[in-house]
Image: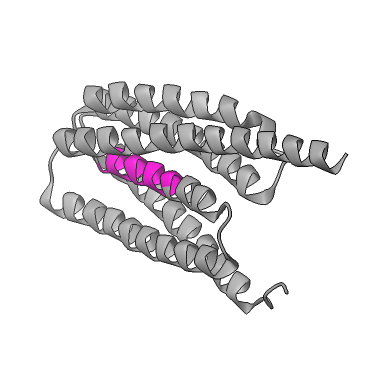
């Protein structure tokens, strides 16, 4: 019976590793695509959305690295990820301020097409992780992050349509700052969790 339980646990672990690996690959790819498109379109919202993809990739990467690792390693990896995300989030907001001062109109159609592609990817990942939405905390968090990504994608699409309709960069900047603030909030949560983990006594 113990051997059977061990085999079932192994199958479950492999399934979770596979799901997270696919989510990581898709998000990392869309981070590169979104960053390239954001720079080409001069869109702060697209760059912020790409940063959110990086945030999720970081979370998925930590989840994969944590398998079979010591608690101290998990804590250091999470803390480093949180610091990087915080710096990037501040950078997105600073870029929004710079664009507001310097000017420049983003390319709305590039924003729309890229965001639709991101929405397709995030919807796929959300369905992939749906079975884990009530599972262990790291898997549940991954599902929640992806759900937030879907909302962010819809926000960028709306901003892009307003940019096309009004020829104004303001909707792009507003959505970009909103996503940047959200990423900073994610970074703070990661840092808090890392600090709480380091404060807990190690299991014998």
Was residue 56 drawn as part of the magenta stretch in this picture? Answer: yes
**Residue at position x 50%, y 34% in the image:** 151
- Image quadrant containing the C terminus: bottom right
Q: Nearer the viewer, residue 53 or 13?
A: 13
In the depicted structure, whether residue 53 falls above or below residue 62: above
Q: Residue at x 52, y 61 (%)?
A: 190
Identify the magenta region.
44-57
Task: State whether residue 61 is above or below residue 10.
Answer: below
Q: Does 170 appear in magenta?
A: no
| Residue 105 percent coordinates (x, y) | 16, 36
The residue that appears at 51% across and 47% down in the rendered structure is 64
Residue 89 in the image: above or below residue 39: below
Classify residue 146 as left or right of residue 132: left
Q: Quadrant of residue 52?
A: top left
The quadrant in which residue 89 appears is: bottom left
Can you say whether 100 is above or below 70 in the image? above
**63 left or right of 13?**
left
Q: Classify the position of the N terminus by image quarter.
A: top right
Specify the principal SS of the magenta part.
helix
Q: Is residue 10 left or right of residue 186?
A: right
Which is nearer the eye, 36 or 128? 128
- Is residue 100 visible from the viewing direction of this image? yes
Residue 146's spot in the image, x, y percent?
52, 37
Q: Is residue 175 visible?
A: no
Query: Residue 16 is drawn in which quadrant?
Result: top right
Colour mode? one colour
Residue 154 percent coordinates (x, y) = 44, 29
148 left or right of 105 in image: right
The percent coordinates of residue 48 (x first, y second) are 33, 45
Q: Residue at x 67, y 75 (%)?
A: 202
């Amino acid at each position: 019976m113990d051997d059977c339980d061990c085999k079932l646990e192994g199958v479950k672990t492999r399934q979770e590793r596979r799901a997270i690996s696919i989510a990581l690959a898709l998000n990392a790819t869309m981070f590169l695509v979104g960053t390239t498109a954001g720079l080409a379109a001069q869109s702060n919202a697209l760059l912020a959305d790409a940063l959110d993809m990086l945030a999720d990739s970081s979370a998925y990467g930590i989840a994969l690295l944590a398998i079979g690792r010591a608690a101290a390693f998990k804590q250091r990896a999470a803390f480093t990820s949180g610091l990087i995300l915080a710096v990037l989030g501040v950078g997105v907001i600073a870029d929004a301020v710079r664009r507001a001062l310097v000017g420049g109109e983003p390319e709305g159609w590039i924003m729309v097409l890229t965001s639709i592609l991101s929405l397709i990817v995030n919807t796929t990942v959300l369905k992939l992780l749906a079975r884990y939405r009530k599972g262990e905390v790291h898997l549940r968090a991954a599902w929640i992050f992806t759900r937030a990504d879907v909302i962010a994608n819809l926000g960028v699409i709306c901003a892009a349509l307003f940019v096309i309709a009004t020829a104004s960069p303001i909707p792009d900047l507003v959505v970009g700052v909103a996503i940047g603030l959200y990423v900073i909030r994610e970074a703070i949560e990661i840092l808090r969790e890392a600090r709480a983990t380091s404060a807990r006594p190690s299991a014998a």
